[in-house]
Image (cartoon, rainbow, N blue to C red):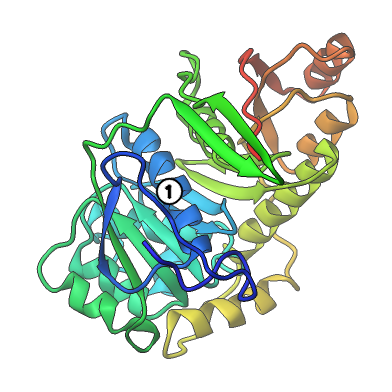
Amino acid sequence: MHLRYGMNPQQIPAAVTALHAPPFTVVHGRPSYLNLLDAVTAWPLVRELAAGGTVAAASFKHVSPAGAALAGPLDPVTAALFGVDPAADAVTRAYARARDTDPKSSYGDVVAVSAPVTAGLAALLRTVVSDGIIAPGYEPGAVAVLAAKKRGTYLVLEADPAFVPPPEEVRELYGLRFVQRRDDAPLPGGLTPDLRLALATARYTQSNAVVLARGGATLGVAAGQQSRVDGIRLAGAKAELWHRRRFAPVEPLPSAQERVTAHLARAATLDPPVPLQDVSLASDGALPFEDNITEAARYGVRHIAEPGGAARSAQIAAAAERHGITVTHTALRLFRH
């Protein structure tokens, strides 16, 4: 498949080749290199999240999730921002919750959902800035609504739910061929639902990755940070803004994108009357210093999942106990580059 260009417009020609049966079909639009990287990273995430029997959605930008969520209830702010009925279908609610994690970063996203796209989700996507979607199917009329976006260039991909990826991943870079086993290790059992959500999301986030979650939805995702503690601060700042937005009025503007922009500006000036609480944190790598725990506690974190095995594990455990935080060692590193 010939692509418009590579990662940047100067990188032409560009193409993608399916080594086996392709994992998706192009229903509408012409993919770009980055669109497909986002799509084939986002689709496995929502499949993994939906394995528990619920509907999942993710909003991807630059090969990392801006947000991910399960199809739980919509709070009044999320419903008003995106013009969604709280009793909407599951796939619409899942995506509204995912995009509400960090709607500023979701601007121009690639959407992934684990269930067929409904008329409700198509209607929501009409009112936000988005580049494309990957889903296992589309209900009648949904493709026509989506195909009209972006002056008719919106990318619509239909994933093959039966596709099984090969056991090896191969990447060629600067004259070298890198080969490794695909990361298909199962997440450990015994995790709370929010820790499982956060950990699965971290698996598909550029390292260093830190994910905060509560109530079946992410609150803040930090990707690509060289410092683990800076990742916690970034994810925490996003979660704190999410919390501030619960107390900001939603202006009755015509589109969801306009409402989001105004809402973000209003919320930044507010001090919530109650602190953020009962947050779960997942880290794709071991927490190296106790300042990671101190920072996490500032954002209401009470449960952490991380690989463990750091040289200062005893100090980290003591710091967690002081802050009333439980730490689960997964023995599973989830770096992604």
Residue placed at 86% from the left, 9% from the top?
Answer: 314
Residue depicted at x 74% and y 22%? 324
Q: Relative to the observer, which residue lies in front, 277 or 227?
A: 227
Give amino acid for label 1: Val
Residue 186 image point, x, y percent: 45, 19
Left or right, 85 with respect to 300, comes to left
Task: Residue 119: give x, y in percent of width and height.
Answer: 19, 69
Callout 1 crowding tier (Cα within 10 Å): few <14, some 14–19, many ≥20? some
Residue 217 % position (x, y): 48, 46
**Placement of 298 over or under 16, stated as above or below:** above
Residue 74, visible in the rendered structure: no
Of the 4 image quadrants, the one containing the N terminus is: bottom left
Q: Secondary structure at mark 1?
A: helix
For label 1, the residue is: 40
Where on the picture, by quarter, is residue 19? top left
Please determine whether, in this image, residue 21 is positioned above or below residue 240.
above
Q: Position of residue 66 (x, y in %)?
A: 57, 56
* Image-based side of 42 in relation to 122, left or right: right
Q: Is residue 256 above or below residue 231?
A: below
Q: Along the line of sight, which residue is nearer the eye, 334 or 330?
A: 334
**Horizontal side, residue 146 vs residue 316: left or right:** left
> Looking at the figure, which quarter contains the C terminus?
top right
Does 130 appear above or below 214? below
| Residue appearing at x 43%, y 48% in the figure | 40
Residue 101 falls left or right of residue 241: left
Write the residue at 57% across / 28% down. Answer: 179
